[in-house]
Amino acid sequence: MSYSDQEKQAAEAQLLQFLQASTTVDDTFTYASKQNVNHELVVGVVKSLLVDAFVTAADLSTSFWVLSEEAESFLAHGSPEVQLFHAIPATDGADKATLEGAVGAALFKVAQGACMKNKWIRMDKATGLIYRNPPRHHLHVVRRVRKSFRIGKGPNFAVQRKRQAAGLNKDMLDSEEWKTEKFKPYNFNTMGLAVGGGHLHPLMKVRAEFRRVLMDMGFDEMPTNRWVESSFWNFDALFQPQSHPARDAHDTFFLTSTHGRGAFTRDESFKNLLRTHTTAVSARMLYKLANYFSIDRVFRNESMDATHLAEFHQVEGVIADYDLSLGDLIGVISGFFTKIGITQMRFKPAYNPYTEPSMEIFAYHPDLKKWTEIGNSGVFRPEMLRPMGLPENVRVIAWGLSLERPTMIKYRLSNIRDLFGHKVDLEQTKSAKLYRM
């Protein structure tokens, strides 16, 4: 907008007089509103005064929300679906061409889909006409239910009622009143009071269930009570290169000292760490044909979110036997999860330094509505088995599964931190069905 010289001079004089009296203008927009002057005119005056150093100025930035041109149109005329709805005759239908002419082809294209989705309109396939549906104001009407009873006389009806005794007491026994007293029948279906202690954490319940299932499948449990491992058993024995990114401090918790006795040697294999998996135990145990499993704590230096923790439990399983294949591995894993109630599973090819072929294991989470990775698996590479002294035709299949994620899926938890960690509400152990014994 252009302004006349007279308007500019008047605005300039007004601004200078204001500065004379008030010294500063905190915000030109507020000033323009109070002085009933267009803000664009004030900005032009300020820039002109800046050139001659009549004023100093600092930029201000204020964010606020306004309606777009499209939203302004909706406010004035209604949304596309409302415009289309009103363009259809109340009793008779209208064809597509008529409605496009009434509201415009572009708006009709948008509005038709929205109206059909909301079930505001319907199309007669025989005639091609579009009709209104009776309006349903479901957003403004709340359905309430009032319960009442129809009463009639019962078999023990009387004008006056004597209340039945709730239980037997000493006075009744002493007076032998109990012989004629009528007692209320016991309700044996009522839940008793919650016990004050002794509730199991869900992970411990699922861990016990997993142990039972694996033992029923013929597995023996490995000793995994040592959380600190050397890099040799955690990485080197599994043919994981010392340059592998997983051995970086960003992924692994390394220990700088043990029992306060200072640092370790420079050799990578002698570094102590909090184990990143329990496969190090499997590597020590694999010197004969066997079926082993373990369920214990592991540690990963990674960011925490709804499905990841830095400290969690791993379910490890290994089978050493003759001529095993990837099909055997899929069958064992599928059989295990079927026994614990998880049937929607997928396997995806993956890479592991010590297994080939390798697979990631996914299960569907009904609340997150996505496939969640719950474990890793594979067939041990021949070069890893050679130092163990196993016969040439012996194959080892192995898998590592998270204990937390199957528990989340089983009990429909969407955030792993509600299950394990410092944010867990321990009061749930007294109320949730998950914990009740």
Image (cartoon, rainbow, N blue to C red):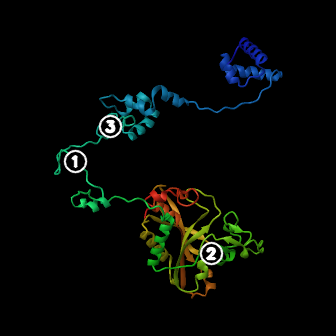
The circle drawn on residue 139 is: none
The circle drawn on residue 161 is: 1
The secondary element bearing badge 1 is classed as loop
Q: Distance from label 3 to label 1 (Cα)?
A: 71 Å
Q: Position of residue 86 (x, y in %)?
A: 38, 28
Q: Distance from label 2 to label 3 (Cα)?
A: 75 Å
User: Is residue 92 toward the left or the right of residue 10 in the image?
Assistant: left
Q: Relative to 339, does residue 117 appear above or below in the rendering?
A: above
Q: Find disc 3 in the rendering and name its residue.
A: 128
Q: Find disc 2 in the rendering and name its residue.
A: 226
Any part of residue 362 in sight? no
Which numbered disc flags the more N-terminal residue, 3 or 1? Answer: 3
Q: Residues within 10 Å of mark 1 (few under 14, many from 20)?
A: few
Which kind of residue does numbered mark 3 sit on?
A: Gly
Q: Distance from label 1 to label 2 (Cα)?
A: 70 Å
Which kind of residue does numbered mark 1 sit on?
A: Arg
The secondary element bearing badge 2 is classed as loop
Which numbered disc flags the more N-terminal residue, 1 or 2? Answer: 1
Residue 173, by quadrant, is bottom left
User: Is residue 269 toward the left or the right of residue 433 in the image?
Assistant: right
Q: Relative to 26, does residue 191 appear above or below in the rendering?
A: below
Q: Position of residue 153 (x, y in %)?
A: 17, 46
Q: Nearer the viewer, residue 301 or 200?
A: 200
User: Is residue 335 toward the left or the right of residue 289 in the image?
Assistant: left
Q: Relative to 109, does residue 370 appear above or below in the rendering?
A: below
Which residue corresponds to the image point at 30% horizontal and 40% vertical from the top-left? 146
Which kind of residue does numbered mark 2 sit on?
A: Arg
Q: Nearer the viewer, residue 159 or 260?
A: 159
Q: Position of residue 180 (x, y in %)?
A: 21, 58
Quadrant the N terminus occupies: top right
Residue closest to the far right: 53
